[in-house]
Amino acid sequence: MHIVLQLIPKKYLIGGTLILLGLSGLLIMSTIVAITGEFEKDSQQSDVTEIEGGGIGIGTANVSPQVMKYQPLLEKYAQKHGLDASYVPIMMALMMQESGGRGNDPMQSSESFCGSVGCISSPELSVDKGVLHFKSVLEKAHYDLKLCLQSYNFGGGFINYVMKNGGKYTPELAISFSQLQYQKVKHTGNYHCVRPEMVPYSACYGDALYVNAVLKYYTGTITADGKPAAPASGGSGGKSGVKVIDAGKTLIGKTRYVFGGGRSQSDINAGRFDCSSFVRWAFEQVGMNVGPMSGVTTDTLKTQGQAINPKDMKPGDVVFFDTYKIDGHVGIYVGNNQFLGCQGKTGVAIASMAKGTYFGERFNGRVKRF
């Protein structure tokens, strides 16, 4: 029988010397900001942050600030374990479901690591082992992403079960596996339905609705084989790259850099941008949505698209620089060691990233093709 489920102020300053020192400090600080002009707005987090991701289909993961802070670690260990970084948004959605980013084991990887709950007390170790486990399950599931996600909850036995019953994840197989396993363990009294809607089916082993529970934090598409997909139409390099550069050049001489600018239509109409909002705007002009107007940052941009070796950069590729932080500045490569970006002293302009220049010394090698 086919089962259809619906997811469901300081006291006085002492002496004129301190006043002068304070004013000097402020002057130095403002000069630094004016020179570098790379400061990206630290997102004022509310309950949920939108994070853009590509690869398995450009989409949006909606996660808490607690999960958001683990993005660099997820990227670090994805690279360490040879997992394409475009899976990071899905793993963030998984973490959101597992723990909301709270506790010492945010990816709930103790059982897969040592066979028992609570053996991991380091969040970084949790991410390390969680990413490794995710990759292992993904490979065993032959890149059936939904099968991978459900097996992260059920365990590897679910993969074997699916392979004997059609070879592909379905919600019905998740329920039937939960039913079978529950019959084996219900006598222990340790298993109870985590979802009331599963009680009528006696599907109380694990969470038979885990896939949808994770994917509710991710809005986007998933390719048929679950593998990272190259951007459509060849991506932002090549002819499409020239188009986005041409679109961006229309703002040269017409804008000024404003920290946190470009995140409202009134800012855009007045020509107020920062580096990441300018990149988002330029791509929008050629029909590519690379993030929400109000939430795009260098950190959201770097999770998107296809990683490119710097030796293979093409016009239209997105390049990142380590300024006030890792990936603190971003722009669009135009060729000949130059990029188009919104910088502090110039607003939107073409700048050099050749060796020996300010940006050339700060280019960190991260190149993404949208």
Image (cartoon, grey):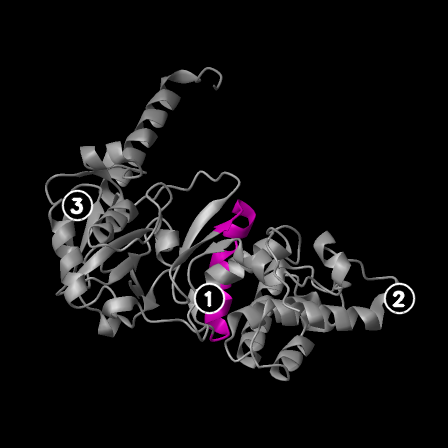
Callout 1 crowding tier (Cα within 10 Å): few <14, some 14–19, many ≥20 = many
Q: Give the label on residue 348, or none.
A: 3
Q: Quadrant of residue 182?
A: bottom right
Q: Is residue 281 magenta?
A: no
Query: Along the horizontal axis of the image, is 22 left or right of 106?
Result: left
Considering the whole magenta stretch, tell me its main secondary structure: helix
Q: Give the label on residue 153, or none.
A: none
Callout 3 crowding tier (Cα within 10 Å): few <14, some 14–19, many ≥20 = many
Q: Is residue 365 above or below residue 27?
A: below
Real-space CA distance between mark 2 and mark 3, rounded to the nearest whole angstrom: 66 Å
Point out the stretch of residues depicted in magenta: 62-82
User: First in sequence: mark 1 or mark 2?
Assistant: 1
Q: Position of residue 52 (x, y in %)?
A: 40, 54
Q: Position of residue 37 (x, y in %)?
A: 26, 43
Say which of marks 2 and 3 sits in front: 2
Q: Is residue 183 visible?
A: yes
Outermost top residue = 12
Q: Residue flagged by tag 2: what amino acid is it?
A: Thr
Q: Which residue is mark 1?
A: 87
Q: Position of residue 267 (x, y in %)?
A: 25, 34
Say which of marks 3 and 1 sits in front: 1
Say which of marks 1 and 2 sits in front: 2
Query: Along the horizontal axis of the image, is 71 left or right of 19?
Result: right
Q: Are marks 2 and 3 in contact (CB under 8 Å)?
A: no
- Label 2: element kind: helix
Q: Residue at x 44, y 66 (%)?
A: 222
Q: Residue flagged by tag 3: what amino acid is it?
A: Val
Q: Give the label on residue 188, or none.
A: 2
Q: Residue at x 67, y 63 (%)?
A: 208
